[in-house]
Amino acid sequence: MPQTNPGSSQSLARRLGLFDATMLVMGGIIGTGIFMNPYVVAQRVHTPALVLGAWLAGGCIALMGGFIWAELADRMPTAGGQYAYLRDAYHPLVSFLYGWVLLLVIQTGGMAAVTVTFARYFLELTGWHSGEWQIAVVALTVLTLINCMGVRAGGTVQSGLMVLKIAAIALLIFAGAFLVHGHVNWKPALDQPLSPGLLSSFGAAMVPVVFAFGGWHTATFASAEMKDPRRDLPRALIMGVIAVALLYTSVNYVCVRALGISTLENTPTPASAVMRMALGQRGATIIALGIAVSTLGYLSQSVLTAPRVYFAMAKDRLFFRQLAWVHPRTQAPVLAIAIQSVWTMVILLTGSYDKILNYVTSMDVLFWALTAASLFILRRRDPVRSAFSMPGHPFTTALFCAVCLAVVGNTLYTYPENTLIGMAILVAGVPMYYIWRRTLRA
């Protein structure tokens, strides 16, 4: 392992443009959820107006997040993105805790689950007789090697997979809208009288929607490798979130139109059902291929972006110093990329990713709230107007924070044991912070 002084390590290469950044934003959001989550929402609210209203509301929340992160990106176009915002607004301990849970469970647990999903669809499509874990390890290894070749190589693969992902979703929308006979009955608009019970049901429906829209923030991790991050990253965040919101709302519209609410709420794979209605078994095969590409694209985005957080931690001397090492030829943080992939493989091979995902959902959203709230602090320190100011601040920013905290509260109420385990993992990072600081700065 190279012995490196982070302060003298080579800088990251600025190779990503506006298109690459937009594909990163969209790739961080779109995984497998949109192909399956419509039925979860339909189980909690039972009219087309409420189902589509939930997705429209989710798009508005995500757009608020996109605008907040756009202003933060304009104010601090530095490596690590969200990690840097938390560090500069609060304290290095807060940013360390974010990086701690990101590597330990949030990013790697999600990557392990997505990799296994890809392996299942791959084996179903090819008919190969192989273990899921073997396909998963090979896929993760290939993407790791590509990203170690440099951010240009990783970005090209990521953008290509994202374009294919958009094509698959567009085909689903077209098939559901024009090749399937159906209609949307907009009456009644509500499934029960306006009451606290209705608000509770709608709030429950919003939880999977909010999670489906999550992930735009991960593009900020790679801001130090964008050609012009102050110009391109804010634009990419806003355009990417709007594009995903349009795709998500359209997918849900065709699912409601083709299947109806009563069938949708009992169909765990609504995208496959719609494509089968439109094109028969061939349609189901096509969408299975689309889901496989979508999972691979999400994994590619994760391998590219998150290691930049561990790189920034090492530069701050809060993690292994070697992770700040940049390969002199590819200008990629290869050791940071490698440690994330190796830990993902450990989680994958031990089969513990399902449990981990239950632990981390509330932590991820909690850090969204903390990051959004950092805008209050940063504006107070530097009142100069940003080129991408959050519209309606402070009210819209406060509303976004309130929604995030409501989701955390709902998760704590619904899954208290899992949420508390997740918080325990987070708190365990506090003594680790002081150990790292004392050891690495000695």
Image (cartoon, helix red, strand yellow):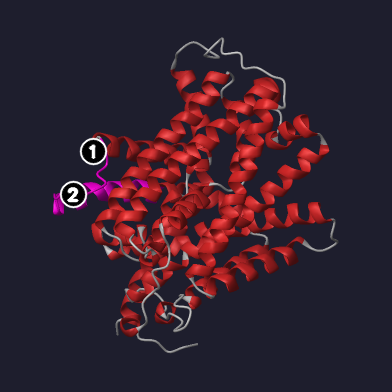
Q: Of marks 1 and 2, which one's residue comes earlier in the chain?
A: 2
**SS of the residue under disc 2:** helix
- Residue at screen point 23% across, 38% down: 393
Disc 2 designates what residue? 379
Q: Residue furthest bottom?
A: 3
Residue in front for this viewpoint, 201 or 331: 331
In the depicted structure, whether residue 400 falls above or below residue 339: above
Q: Is residue 88 left or right of residue 143?
A: left
In the depicted structure, whether residue 78 falls above or below residue 282: below
CA gap, disc 1 and disc 2? 10 Å
- Residue at screen point 78% across, 44% down: 285
- Residue at screen point 73% across, 64% down: 135
> Pointer 1: residues within 10 angstroms few (<14), some, or many (20+)?
few
Q: Is 386 in the magenta?
A: yes
Q: Are marks 1 and 2 in contact (CB under 8 Å)?
A: yes
Q: Is residue 297 left or right of residue 87?
A: right
Q: Give, as a single range, the part of the protein colored magenta.
A: 366-391
Residue 412 x/y as whole percent = 47, 41
Residue 254's label in the rendered image is none
In the depicted structure, whether residue 255 falls above or below residue 367: above
In the depicted structure, whether residue 185 falls above or below residue 365: above
Q: Is residue 390 left or right of residue 415?
A: left
The three-letter code of the residue at mark 1 reads: His
Residue 152 x/y as whole percent = 49, 68
Q: Residue 204: tell me if it is visible.
A: no
Residue in front for this viewpoint, 35 or 44: 35
Location of residue 173 (image quadrant): top right
> Pointer 2: residues within 10 angstroms few (<14), some, or many (20+)?
some
Disc 1 designates what residue? 393
